[in-house]
Image (cartoon, rainbow, N blue to C red):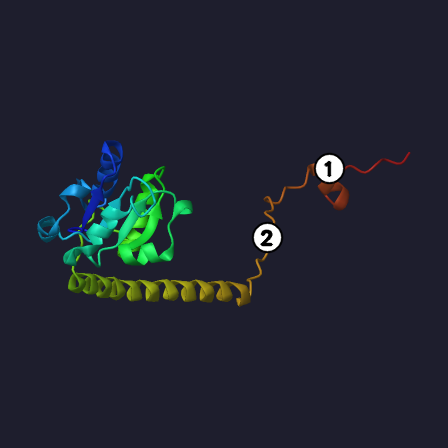
Amino acid sequence: MTGVTILVIDAGEDIDLKMTATLEAENYLVYPVSSQDVNPELAELLRPSLIYIKPLELSPTGLKPCKAIHSIPLLKKVPIIILASPKKAPGPDYSRDYGIVDFLELTFSPEDLIEKTGTILGKTAPSPSPKEDEPVAPPKTKRKMEKKRSALLFPAIGIVLLLMIAGAGFLAYQQFMPTRKVLPSPTATGPPRAPSTAQELNRNPSCPGKRRGKKF
C-alpha cells in the first residue's frame, strides 16, 4: 500500500529496526519517533494512517502519551496499536478515550506485524502480478488474440472430424465388402513321355518286330 505512513513511537531501537524493515518491504512509510516529538506540526507534516506505540506500562500514567496523541485534531481518528500483551489490556473506556484499537505482542513475527497492520488498515491481498518475462497485453490485444485462436481452432476441429468420419467409413467398407474367392492354380504337368519299346510291343501283338515262338 504505497504512500501509507505509519508512526512507531517509543518502541526502542531493536523494535524500530524490525518494524521498519518489515513494513517498508510492504511499501509502507515508517517513521520511528519519540512521544515527546509528536505534536500538531508533526501530524500535519506526516499525516499518519496508523500508530504503533510502546507505553512504559498499561496504566493511566503509562498511557498518557496515547491520550496526548489522541487529543491532537489530525490524529484523533488515527488508530493506535499498543505494543504489549493484550492480557494486560486496560478497560474499554481507555481504548475508546485514547483511540486504542488493538494490541500486538512484543514477540511478534514479521508475519504477525504485516497481518495486524493490514487488518487495521483494511488492506486487501494484492492481486497476483504477471511474471517479469511476460509482457502485459492490453484488453484489446487480448481480445484480438482470443478471436484469432478461435478462428484457427474451429477449422482444425473440422479437419479432425472429417478424418475420423473417413476412417470410420473405410473400416465399414472393408468389413462389409464380399471377399473374392481365389481359384487354385492348375497343377503343372510335364510333357507326355514316349512309351518304351517293350511296353509298346506288349500292347500291340501284331507288331512285326515281335517274334512268335516256334512249335516243334
Q: Residues within 10 Å of mark 2 (few under 14, many from 20)?
A: few
Tell me which residue sits at (58%, 58%) in the image. 183
The location of residue 202, given as percent across then percent down, is: 77, 42
Residue kind at label 2, given as amino acid type:
Pro
Of residue 121 and residue 35, the one placed in the foreground of this image is 35
Q: Would residue 186 appear left or right of 11 to someone viewing this image?
A: right
Element under label 2? loop
Of residue 188 and residue 129, the one placed in the foreground of this image is 129
Against 149, residue 50 (above or below) is above
Q: Which residue is mark 2?
A: 186
The location of residue 89, given as percent across then percent down, is: 38, 48
Q: Which mark is residue 198?
A: 1
Against 164, residue 64 (above or below) is above
Residue kind at label 1, given as amino acid type:
Ala
For this orientation, the residue located farthest to the right is 216
Tell me which residue sits at (19%, 56%) in the image. 71
The location of residue 100, given as percent across then percent down, is: 30, 53
